[in-house]
Amino acid sequence: MKFPFDDAPNTMAIICSHILEQGDNILYVSHDEDDGMWQFLCGNSHEITDAKLVALEEVFALDNSIARIADMPYGYIATRKNVNSEWKIHKK
Ligand SMILES: [Zn+2]
């Protein structure tokens, strides 16, 4: 599958340790307004130590359903109830 993001595949992104280390699903995505950083979170609460840095292509390899929100502009977030529901995109 073609890499769907405008960002380079090796762009650093934030992912939470629950997804990276415990295999939780991506249910909350933020495309930060100030610096364009992508954040992929499980939807639960987080401490700063839960934030891990990985390449965007690693996140895509983990769950290619994020292709559907790859064109989300800066300052927007996407959420879904579970992996089978559609992404809901709205301004932060
Ligand atoms: Zn998490």
Image (spheres, grey):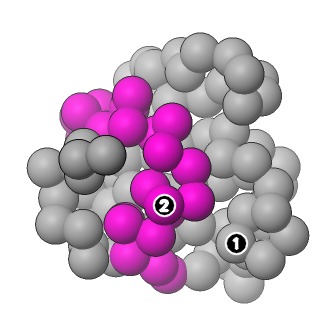
Q: Nearer the viewer, residue 3 or 48?
A: 3
Is residue 63 highlighted in magenta? yes
Please state which of residues 37 and 22 is positioned toward the viewer in this rendering: 22
Query: From the viewer's perspective, is 23 left or right of 85?
Result: right
In this rendering, is residue 34 above or below 67? Answer: below
Q: Mark 2: few, some, or many residues within 10 Å (few <14, many ≥20)? A: few
Q: Are marks 1 and 2 in contact (CB under 8 Å)?
A: no
The residue type indicated by label 2 comes to Ala
Q: Position of residue 7 (x, y in %)?
A: 17, 58
**In this picture, residue 21 sits left or right of residue 52:** right
Q: Is residue 50 left or right of residue 56?
A: right
- Relative to 27, say whether 21 is above or below: below
Report crowding for label 1: few under 14, some 14 to 19, many 20 or more residues within 10 A (C-alpha): many
**Which residues lie in the magenta part?**
53-76
* Percent of width and height locating residue 76: 37, 32
Can you tell which quarter of the image residue 37 is in?
bottom left
Q: Amino acid at mark 1?
A: Leu
Cα–Cα gap, marks 1 and 2:
12 Å
The numbered disc on residue 61 is 2
Q: Mark 1 vs mark 2: give the one in front.
A: 2
Q: Is residue 68 above or below residue 48?
A: above
Residue at (38, 76) in percent of width and height: 55
Q: Tell me which numbered mark, 1 or 2, is placed earlier along the sequence.
A: 1
The residue drawn where x is 31% and y is 38% is 70
Q: Residue 20: which numbered mark, if any? A: 1
The image quadrant of residue 13 is: bottom left
Q: Dot 1: what SS?
A: helix
Name the element at disc 2.
helix
User: Where's residue 22, x and y in %?
Assistant: 85, 70
Q: Is residue 39 left or right of residue 9?
A: right
| Residue at the (44%, 19%) spot, across then down | 90
